[in-house]
């Protein structure tokens, strides 16, 4: 599936839903988008139901950047529409999808959110 259709389907799935660790969060949002593009959901092997479990899982895996790199390959230099990105928002590092103008993500306390492209720290091609 092309990136735009995959993003729209993922946005439709998430729209109006409240943030929930392990089901409606930035990792699950991004993994569902990637699954629509590739047919493989890299988050299937990572299960957590709260922030503490998510942090333990991320620490055991070496960080979210290692998980995404294992699934998508090495990060790239510049973000293009359809890329998976890791953003920096203070102490929070949400994953999302860059659409060319901003980043779609799911953020605790907000649900589905648009983030500024200036927050992008790492990016991967799908």
Image (cartoon, grey):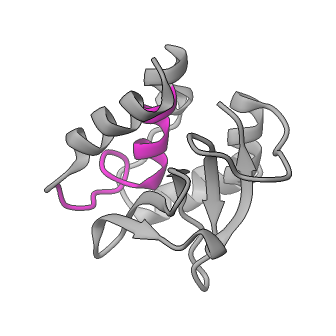
Where residue 2 sits in the image (x, y, percent)? Answer: 48, 23
Compared to 121, does 73 lie above or below?
Answer: above
Q: From the viewer's side, name the closer residue of 101 and 63.
A: 101
Vertical placement of residue 76 versus 90, above or below? above
Between 43 and 55, the residue placed more toward the observer is 43
**Could you tell me residue 103's position as x and y percent?**
50, 60
Q: Where is residue 114 in the image (x, y as percent from the top left)?
A: 40, 67
- State the image quarter where residue 105 is shown: bottom left
Quadrant of the rendered structure where residue 95 is? bottom right
Apparent side of residue 5 relative to residue 68 in the rendered image (left or right): left
Q: Nearer the viewer, residue 117 or 40?
A: 117
Q: Does the magenta stretch include residue 107?
A: no
Q: Which residue is drawn at 22% across and 39% down?
A: 13
**Residue lying farthest left?**
16
Magenta-colored span: 17-34
Q: Give the residue drawn at x 56%, y 75%.
A: 92
Q: In which quarter of the image is the N terminus?
A: top left
Horizontal relation, residue 107 to residue 123: left or right: left
Name which residue lies at 77% across and 45% down. 66
Task: Residue 45 in the image: state x and y as whole percent.
Answer: 53, 28
């Amino acid at each position: 599936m092309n990136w735009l259709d995959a993003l729209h389907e993922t946005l439709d799935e998430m729209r109006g839903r409240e943030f929930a660790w392990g089901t409606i969060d930035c990792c699950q949002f991004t993994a569902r988008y990637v699954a629509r593009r590739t047919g493989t959901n890299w988050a299937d092997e990572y299960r957590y139901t709260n922030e503490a479990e998510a942090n333990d899982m991320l620490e055991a895996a070496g960080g979210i950047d290692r998980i995404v790199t294992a699934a998508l390959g090495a990060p790239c230099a510049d973000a293009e529409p359809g890329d998976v990105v890791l953003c920096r928002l203070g102490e929070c590092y949400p994953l999302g999808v860059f659409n060319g103008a901003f980043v779609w993500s799911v953020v605790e306390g907000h649900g589905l959110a648009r983030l500024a492209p200036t927050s992008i720290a790492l990016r991967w091609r799908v």
